[in-house]
Image (tube, rainbow, N blue to C red):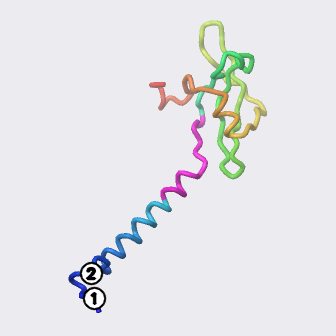
Amino acid sequence: MTDDKTSFWTPARIGAVIGAVLLVVALAYLVSLPQNKYHPCDLLEPTYAGDADLGFWMVDKYDPEVDVYHLLVVMEHPNGTFEWLDGDGIWLPRRAVEGTFTVIGSFDARKAHL
């Protein structure tokens, strides 16, 4: 029989190893969840010049159940200001939006630093 004082696998070490494994599994699960990159009121423009004809859009909301963004059309005025147009907008998959658009500002006053 082994002596508890000389054995490497004490109950405390076994518990620490189990805890570390569970922590790694939990973190891996959280990282694998879809993370929405954009937030409501973000002003978007196409990332690539070839997509410039898509114009400007505003994120209205994100639906995590189906992983889609609801975007509203944004109009740029001659003086450089922007205005979103109320209407139906369009629902697009998260991957399509995040791969096509870049945030250039926000209509949210709390994000005035953008």
Q: Position of residue 87 (x, y in %)?
A: 77, 30
Q: Magenta span covers which residues?
A: 27-40
The residue closer to the viewer here, 105 or 6, is: 6
Q: Position of residue 90 (x, y in %)?
A: 76, 34
Q: Position of residue 16 (x, y in %)?
A: 35, 71
> Residue, x 54% and y 24% (percent of image)?
105
**Mark 2 sits on what residue?**
7
* Left or right: residue 99 compared with residue 113: right
The residue closer to the viewer here, 80 or 26, is: 26
The residue closer to the viewer here, 42 or 68, is: 68
How many circles with numbers are drawn on the protein?
2
> Residue, x 72% and y 25% (percent of image)?
73
Q: Residues within 10 Å of mark 2 (few under 14, many from 20)?
A: few
**Mark 1 sits on what residue?**
2
Tell me where residue 86 sits by quadrant. Answer: top right
Along the polypeptide, which appears first: circle 2 or circle 1? 1
Residue 65 shows which numbered tag?
none
Q: Magenta segment: does it hold 110?
A: no
Q: As shown in the figure, which amino acid type bears the numbered disc 1?
A: Thr
Asked whether disc 2 touches disc 1, contact meaning CB atoms under 8 Å apart, the reply is: yes
Taking the view exactly as shown, the residue that stands out farthest to the top is 78
